Image: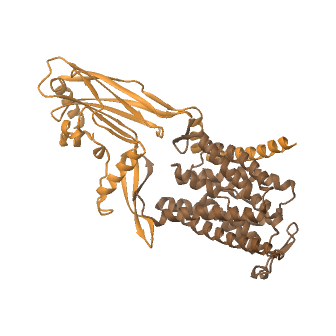
Chain colours: A brown, B orange
Amino acid sequence: MQIYLPIAEISVNAFLLFGIGGIVGFLSGLFGVGGGFLITPLLFFMGISPAVAVATGANQVVASSISGVLAQLRRKAVDFQMGSVLLVGGLLGSGAGIWVFSVLSAAGQIDLFVQLSYVLFLGLVGALMLQESLRAMWRTRAGQPPRRAHIHTWAHGLPFKMKFRASGLYISIVPPLAVGALVGFLSAIMGVGGGFIMVPAMIYLLGVPTRVVVGTSLFQIIFVAGFSTVMHAITSQSVDLLLALLLILGGVIGAQIGSRVGLRLRADQLRILLALLVLAVAIKIAFDLLLRPDEMYSLSVTGLL
Amino acid sequence: MRRWLALLCLIALPCQADETIVAGLSQANVSITTDFVGSEILIYGAVKRETPAPEGALEVIVTVEGPPAEMTVRRKDWVWGIWINDAEVVVDRAPIFYAIATTGRLEEILSETEDLRHKISIPRAIRAVGTTDEAEGSDLFVEALIRLRAARGSYLDSQGSVRLTEGTLFRTDIALPSNLTEGDYRVRIFLTREGRVVDMLERGIRVRKAGLEQFFTRMAHEQPLLYGLLALLIAGLAGWAASAAFRFIRI
């Protein structure tokens, strides 16, 4: 069934979009990430313009994060204090990201910037995650107890300390603010929630216990992605509601199934799979930048007269 | 001055145009609805003559032209080991959609000067003045523009697809693609003989979004804040509903 998208101004197969939403939702439920890093590149491949893909991707992230955070709330696995501090940083970063996005769009370099961000961040996070989870797996196999992730770092020496009860932490609010700002910035530019950066950053940089990481990250992503959506709607009118609706419908159903399947799999195996997936996307995009393209020219309609 | 010229043309017209076009379109309005998959427009007509047909073969050219737009063409170059957008040329006026259908090969049925005057062929329909010194070889950029628009079905070159029967009746189908942009489209029909334009007729097609499409587009542009909040509301409801529904199924 073909459907004409009002803002993207392109006719696409509704079931295909529903399916993409479903598969990405399934993965996001499985791994506890928003899945934006998969949706946005997939929309590019379907011929939807980067501006619309990024803005609509952000909207889809809101839906899947709400669905996910509700499940985490029932398990009391959300640290609202930590989430709020991350959120303040996130909104600042998102505002800056929206501004950079419109400047780069005008200069014709947004595609490059988005692609480079994907390669850099997905590659880095994927590689770190793979290395860490492989090491953890070998350690458990060798019979040694898993090492505690919470270690004292330079981050604990900074001023403006605050108690985070749910996480059992007493740390400076500067690192969470900075992590939040970075993720908010990327969320606005890449159309992603940034869970794939937020989750490792919270575990390794802030020392937040793994139990509350996913819920807290999802909690703040809702607001940052929501803010990005509204800002994109205002500055570039590039949110496509119909596209979002189809992706969301598929996504929320997939996410629920994914999170149930996820409970039956082992955590370390899940992490290896996620790391491989993240790396695969990074490598694919890197190849696009490195190989000589078939079509050297690109065209954008800069204004109707 | 222009009014005088127009008047002169009016006086001169009856004796110049011994042959005139009578034509119709299968539809003058195209509505883009949610299930829009493109639209086929039938353009048909006849040649009206008072006197017997003069020497030389009669040819018909039909063009359909979308609203004009400013377009930027960018070329990728190899910089620091990766391919990035580098040189760019801004084409100040190119139609967002352009279709040309003819009875024969364009260069045989239309002279260069007439093409220049009426802007019939695809390269002539694009105005790229003042782009020459922005990047070396801006012709390549205009060529790329045509190639890229053609690849997405927005520029259609169907030479030889107009059927002309007994030098009088003609018809052709133009397929408007599914990725159509709304606006006022212009249909032009030319009669040519030995490369010269004998008569020309102009018609319009209104392409408009309708129903849900129109509602969303209008809201996105006129009430962007409300639209953004609506998007959030939908996302929130869907997220909550899925979570609630699945919990219900489990119990």
Q: In the rendered image, which quarter contains the C terminus of chain B? A: top right
- Left or right relative to A69: residue A96: left
Q: Which of B131 and A59 is in front in this view?
A: A59
Q: Is residue B77 above or below residue B164?
A: below
When asked about the image quadrant of residue B52, the answer is: top left
| Residue depicted at 72% across the width and 51% down the height | A64
- Left or right relative to B30: residue A137: right
| Residue depicted at 47% across the width and 67% down the height | A290
Q: Is residue B134 above or below residue B81?
A: above
Regarding residue A92, the answer to whether it shows in the image is no
When asked about the image quadrant of residue A144, the answer is: bottom right
Regarding residue B186, the answer to whether it shows in the image is yes
| Residue depicted at 42% across the width and 30% down the height | B40
Measuring from the top left, give residue A52's x and y in whole percent.
56, 50
Q: Which of B104 and B66 is in front in this view?
A: B104
Measuring from the top left, give residue A118's x and y in whole percent.
58, 64
Measuring from the top left, give residue A21's x and y in whole percent.
65, 47
| Residue depicted at 34% across the width and 32% down the height | B187
